[in-house]
Amino acid sequence: MLLLGDVASGLYGRDVRFGEWLAARVLVDQLDRALAGGKTPETSARLALRAQELVRPTTLRRFAARLERHLEEAQQPDRFFLSARVPARRKRVVESEAAIRVLIERLRGAGLASARGAALVSVLLHDGSGPLYGQGSTRSLSAQIDEAIEALNSICAW
């Protein structure tokens, strides 16, 4: 069951269609960017489905585990190994350790999380050109983490 619509005209519920479910699985990056940019989940079935997935406690714990792995890897000595995985920028991770730990605590903590906040974390973890991975990124990693924490705590934007 999905809630769609907007605050002005009202929300309504309806069942999920297979095509919408499939699109929500395939278009993850696009949907995460839209939610992170402030688009409300109620505006489309795809966004609503993706938002439901993002705010699940299991998804939030998975994000926390990935952030913890980045912290652990940043503390290890440099090792060269072949991998398809883009490594996190070690110096940025070390410099932002305190903010990352606060974010991990928030992701693992009890309570509700906003879809926008969870989408911001997802974009942070999956955007190869963002401040966590991208060498040329002009955005501060700490600033993006702070934005995600603030958004996670903002349950209702209207």
Image: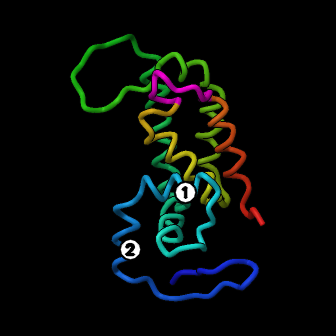
Residue found 39% across the figure and 60% down from its top: 27
Q: Where residue 108 sits in the image (x, y, percent)? A: 58, 48
Residue found 21% across the figure and 23% down from its top: 82
Number of the label disc, if any, that sits on residue 128: none
Q: Is residue 129 above or below residue 45?
A: above
Q: Is residue 20 magenta?
A: no
In the image as oriented, which residue stretches furthest toward the left? 82
Which amino acid does the dot numbered 1 rest on? Ala
Q: How many marks?
A: 2
Quadrant housing residue 55: bottom right
Residue found 49% across the figure and 45% down from its top: 63
Residue labelled with disc 1: 34
From the viewer's perspective, is 76 left or right of 85? Answer: right
Q: Where residue 6 sits in the image (x, y, percent)? A: 68, 78
In the image, the segment drawn in magenta is 131-141
Residue labelled with disc 2: 21
Around disc 2, counting alpha carbons within 10 Å, would you say few (fewer than 14), some (14 to 19), or many (20 or more)?
A: some
Q: Where residue 127 sits in the image (x, y, percent)? A: 45, 39
Q: Do the residues labelled 1 and 2 touch (CB within 8 Å)?
A: no
Quadrant housing residue 76: top left
Around disc 1, counting alpha carbons within 10 Å, would you say few (fewer than 14), some (14 to 19), or many (20 or more)?
A: some
Residue found 51% across the figure and 84% down from its top: 1
Q: In this view, does 153 lie above or below 7?
A: above
The residue closer to the viewer here, 91 or 135, is 135
Quadrant housing residue 28: bottom left
- Of the 4 image quadrants, the one containing the C terminus is bottom right
Q: Where residue 97 sits in the image (x, y, percent)? A: 60, 25
Which amino acid does the dot numbered 2 rest on? Trp
The residue closer to the viewer here, 89 or 67, is 89
